[in-house]
Amino acid sequence: MSNQYDAVVVGAGHNSLSTAAYLAKSGMSVCVLEKNEIIGGGAVSREVTAPGFKHDTHATGIILAMANPMISQDELELQSRFGLKFMSPEATYVSLFEDETWIGTFMGLDQTCESIAKYSAKDAETYRAFVNRTIKMGPIFTQGMFKPPIPPEMMLTMLGQGPEGQEIISLYGRSCYDLVLEMFEHPKVRMHFLKWVAEGMVNPSRPGTASSLYFMTAVAHTQEETAVVGGTQAMSDSLGRCIEHHGGEIRINTWVRKVITSGGKATGVELSDGEVITASKCVVASIHPHLLGDYIDGLDPTLVEDAKNVPLSSYGAINTHWALHEAPSYKCPEINKALLVETIPADMDRLMSSFDDCTNGKLASVFNAVVAHHTNHDPSRAPEGKHTLYLYCFAPLLLKNTGPLGGQDVDGWTDEIRDEYKEWMVSEYAKFCTNMTPDNIIASAAESPKDMAEWSPSFQNGDIMGVTGALPLGARPTPVLAQYAVPGAQGLYLSGPFCHPGGAITGGGRATAMKILMDSGVDVSTLMQI
Ligand SMILES: Cc1cc2nc3c(=O)[nH]c(=O)nc-3n(C[C@H](O)[C@H](O)[C@H](O)COP(=O)(O)OP(=O)(O)OC[C@H]3O[C@@H](n4cnc5c(N)ncnc54)[C@H](O)[C@@H]3O)c2cc1C
């Protein structure tokens, strides 16, 4: 194994793998270094319950990446050459209410409106008119997502030039909660949209969240929501195959402890065993802004302090995985068509209290989950005839009170609290089903925000989006670091959920590669659509 490359990449999350794949395809020699025993970071599937059951321990529903030319144009040949396949069940996501009624969001607007009209014809028509407007705004949202971001002041000027952009500007400071109450009359319709927006991990009552509904509806009716055939891991593995095909190397079980700089330039990295690997052109690093000062010596103290102070999301999640004999059988059978099911409490106050509890450090006493049963659509994820279940609830990043587990004040997560909440979650979930009895369960596992942070330092305190989604466009994670480059460490570029375009599976590392290649004077038009 060599220890000299053009590009050294710290971390093998899907973002840095995407960057590495473009760099390798451009002809650079590339080495990717990953601390875990598998590549993928938050895009992994692991047999955490029983042999043969592949669970997406983190990301499971994929939509934003579908708009990325990396996937939509197959720029890296991930689909045509390296084995990546998606599946897309009929309904994107379905809200299942405690009284066994439901509302679905489908890619088709007519079908979605029919689902809403069961509760309110007026709300269905309001939604139709709203989506017909947001779809026109779609390009404003998505066109810049997979390129280096436009600086905030330029973005504002551009938005101000047309009526759609002006409408987006007018949303600044408004909460999704206020918007939804103003737009829709039926409580179930309101809750359907509030819960969906809450998936961005920012409390929807927070000022600034209104624009999320515009963005999400624009995307939901133009891009398929998918899951990866065989599990999300297969996406990371296809990126790994692409990197190796173009001559790149990937080392797992390899901790990077420092980025080395000399004369204001990043020249390589030092591993936890002291080995030094040099980079002649660039170092790409999944280093969370809170940790920047720990990894790189000699940076401007104000830059380091500002990065350390970037706020995290409102809450995180506890994610549980179940190996089952039979797929969950719902009392409401239409639910099986959905890719993702959102269980929703009976009234608005209880729904909002669950977000507020998690924001305030308390485990929510109201059951408010996201569920996926991928083996209904993709049997390759479990042994023949068996099934998997993904059952996820919002949870505090820093736990202070155990809520439904006796309401004790505590100082942080423990494995016992996590496992007790897992059992509470499945007992609440079982109320929606006819067969979620102990004899259907083969094995289970859970991850708390603390476990997620240990798996990937991009998820500080378990923030699955890296940092809050409430930062101004083009200024993520800070205005100074927004263009991926790190002033004072020339040749060092950041890649991660804390950078533009943000958390989730986006393939956003494409934009980092574009920036690096353009800085190196490479004509990127031969590699990627500009
Ligand atoms: C429970 C959960 C559910 C989620 N559900 C969804 C979903 O359904 N849909 C969706 O789109 N998104 C979802 N997400 C969010 C999504 O998974 C992340 O935002 C995304 O994976 C971030 O990708 P990344 O490549 O930027 O970083 P990461 O995936 O965090 O990868 C960073 C990698 O770098 C490695 N690393 C860091 N520092 C070092 C070091 N010093 N040395 C060596 N290696 C290092 C880490 O081990 C890790 O593998 C979910 C996340 C979680 C945790």
Image (cartoon, helix red, strand yellow):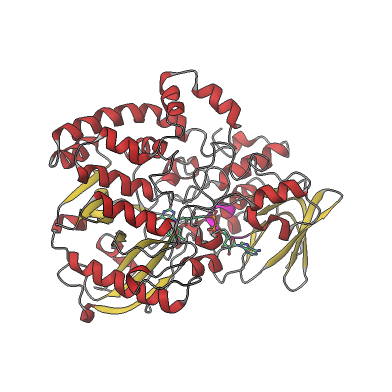
The residue lying furthest to the right in this view is 263
Residue 310 appears anywhere in the view: yes
Residue 250 x/y as whole percent: 62, 63
Q: Nearer the viewer, residue 59 or 126?
A: 126
Looking at the rendering, in which quadrant would you find the N terminus? bottom right
Which stretch appears magenta?
A: 11-16
Q: Quadrant of residue 376?
A: bottom left
Magenta stretch: includes residue 96: no
Q: Nearer the viewer, residue 505 or 454?
A: 454
Q: Residue at horizontal 32%, vertical 70%?
A: 404
Q: Nearer the viewer, residue 69 or 429?
A: 429
Image height check: is 526 above or below 30? above
Image height check: is 254 above or below 516? below
Residue 63 x/y as whole percent: 39, 47
Residue 273 x/y as whole percent: 74, 74
Magenta stretch: includes residue 12: yes
Residue 48 appears anywhere in the view: no
Looking at the rendering, in which quadrant would you find the C terminus? top right
Q: Is residue 27 left or right of residue 231?
A: right
Tally the marks. Answer: 0
Q: Residue at horizontal 48%, vertical 40%?
A: 69
Q: Residue at horizontal 37%, vertical 79%?
A: 50
Residue 421 x/y as whole percent: 35, 72
